[in-house]
Amino acid sequence: MFKKKQKKVSRSAGASPIPTGYSKMIQWCLDNNIAISITPNWNMSDGNWKIEIRINNKLHVDPANYTVANVHDKKYEYYKYYYDKYNKISKQ
């Protein structure tokens, strides 16, 4: 007989539309090796998320826990922060 494959445990924070004006900031960050991702916090119950920030292949994890309701807003806030901090052209 065939054995059923066991389902892997997974979570999804769902999709979130990119706020107006953030596409340029996100693309600039990605072009300059700054990537921000959302990962589940497996140590907590459902609905808790962490934000990982990778800058030039160095991984930094935000110590705070976020809910699905606010994790995407925080991700876009980080993209704006790093764009404003490191983009020399926008400061001129």
Image (cartoon, rainbow, N blue to C red):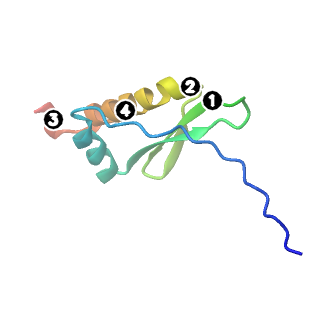
Q: Residue at x 63, y 29 (%)?
A: 47
Camera-near label (1 vs 4) is 1
Residue 6's label in the rendered image is none
Residue 76's label in the rendered image is 4
Q: Residue at x 54, y 31 (%)?
A: 62
Which residue is denoted by mark 2 in the rendering? 67
Camera-near label (4 vs 3) is 4
Residue type, mark 1 in image: Gly
Which residue is denoted by mark 3 in the rendering? 90
Which residue is denoted by mark 1 in the rendering? 47
Residue 11, how many percent across, how many down? 63, 42
View extreme (bottom): residue = 1
Residue type, mark 3 in image: Ser
Residue 92, how many percent across, how many down? 10, 33
Q: Secondary structure at mark 1?
A: loop
Residue 17, how many percent across, how many down? 35, 37
